[in-house]
Image (cartoon, rainbow, N blue to C red):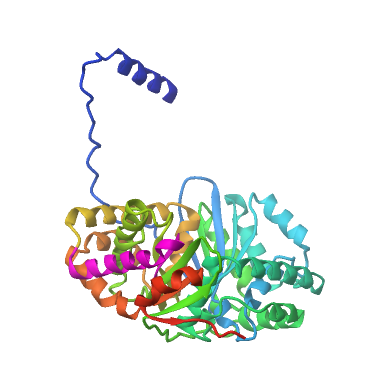
Amino acid sequence: MIRNVLLATCALALAAPASAPAQQEQPPAGGEPKDFRLPEPETLRLENGMRVTLVPYGVLPKVTTTLVVRVGNVDEAASQVWLADLTGDLMEEGTTTRTAEEVAQAAASMGGGLSIGVGLDQTTVGLDVLSEFGPDAVRLLAEVTRHPRLPASEIDRLKTDRIRQLSIAQQQPQQMALARFRQVLYGDHPYGRLFPTEEMLRGYTIEQVQRFHGEQFGAARAHLYVVGRFDGGAMKAAARQAFGDWGAGTPPTTNVPSPQTARKVHLIDRPGAAQSTVYLGLPVIDPSHDDYVPLFVTNALLGGSFASRITSNIREDKGYTYSPFSQISTRYRDAYWVEVADVTTAVTGASLQEIFGEIDRLQQEPPGADELEGIQNYVAGTFVLQNSSRGGIIGQLAFLDLHGLTQSYLTNFVRNVYAVTPDEVRRITGSYLDDERMTIVVAGDREQILDQIREFGEIVEPAVP
């Protein structure tokens, strides 16, 4: 059908008189933006404190079950960096009653595959299956999370994998710059410890992993999300049966950092590098603050979208870099704004000048109404698209849970995006993006960039051992 329409269109174009002027058809006007509407979720709390949220969604006979546990790198001591990640690796190596292969086969027989992810604040254990296997998926998640085998026979192999990942990451300029940026902001807080040492990784024992799992995983930190097509009664019964006798354990860690920032340039020497990797930013408000959505929109206009000012300037207009971006990176009761760019070595200083120039301009002059509307359309549209899948909905619900937000954050997000005014963007930029306090990290060829970056602040270099 589509092919026939295309052929007919081409035929009409060829048949038109050669002298006829080209007519550019204007796209139809956009429709009225609509608020995001989530099907009414049902949440119950088990006697041990664990919560279960069920959301009917979609028409496909599929259901996604994800257990989110408030356990992550934030729970690690200074001598335990990546211990949470190693624990997650070992949780994939089977349960006390099934081997890893048997767990994989069980998941595959339901039409899905098990996934475990470890982050700074949360660990997720997920399974996307055919609807008829929803209760079985819940039981498998419980088995993997509550009764992992954690086999000593696999720890050396997994530590070797992690050591290889560490070696690769520490050679990548963006990872090097991010590690320095986070260390400067957070110091010895877990958020500031991006990498362990190889010696630290090699020293981990199976007893440490078992202790970490036993102390950190419990019902009081867990929330099961079920999204898709399912039998509500059967799913609730499965959750009670699989998790109801799980011990509450300890409450979630509330280790809120006190990040520091100052206008200094932290230089990482990469002799001969053709590019400089730039990180610049500072701590900002977290999602629980009333100004977070206006800040989110401001970020998209400044550097967080392809049509943003910084991207248009140093990518499109000047060709200094290929893929710059800015973002608001969030954690529990914490966030920072950062602009990231890999720029040609010869224009490292010029790139910093243009980035700060765009920040200063937005502090002094509000954007035009048309420019802001285009960004608002982008933010609202991507928000709705991100929430158009089972996994996307679970991600948003877990975000609300972590940051203590109500469901109104989701339902009012689109209207709050469109409520942001040009003057508010200017206010937000001036209030939260103070370029005189921004931490700057540059990983590049010291010999070529040192003179370029002196004007942007005191140069700080790592001590030579």
Determine the residue positioned at 72% across, 56% down: 104
Main SS, magenta region, reads helix
Residue sitting nearer the eye, 51 or 324: 324
Residue sitting nearer the eye, 110 or 391: 391
Q: Does the magenta run of residues contain 327?
A: no
Determine the residue positioned at 54% across, 84% down: 251
Residue 154, percent from left and from top? 79, 69
Query: Based on the displayed image, in which of its 4 quarters is residue 458 positioned?
Result: bottom left
Q: Residue furthest right?
A: 153
Residue 455 visible:
yes
Q: Does the magenta run of residues contain 361?
A: yes
Determine the residue positioned at 56% across, 63% down: 66
Query: Based on the displayed image, in which of its 4 quarters is residue 87 positioned?
Result: bottom right
Query: Based on the displayed image, in which of its 4 quarters is residue 78 positioned?
Result: bottom right
Residue 404 visible:
no
* Count of numbered badges drawn on the protein: 0
Residue 465, percent from left and from top? 62, 86
Residue 269, percent from left and from top? 53, 73
Q: Say above or below: 3 vs 252.
A: above
Q: Quadrant of the N terminus?
A: top left
- Residues shaded magenta: 337-366
Residue 21, percent from left and from top? 20, 22
In this rendering, position of residue 118 left or right of residue 275 = right
Q: Say above or below: 134 vs 214.
A: above
In this rendering, position of residue 26 left or right of residue 81 = left
Determine the residue positioned at 41% across, 59% down: 324
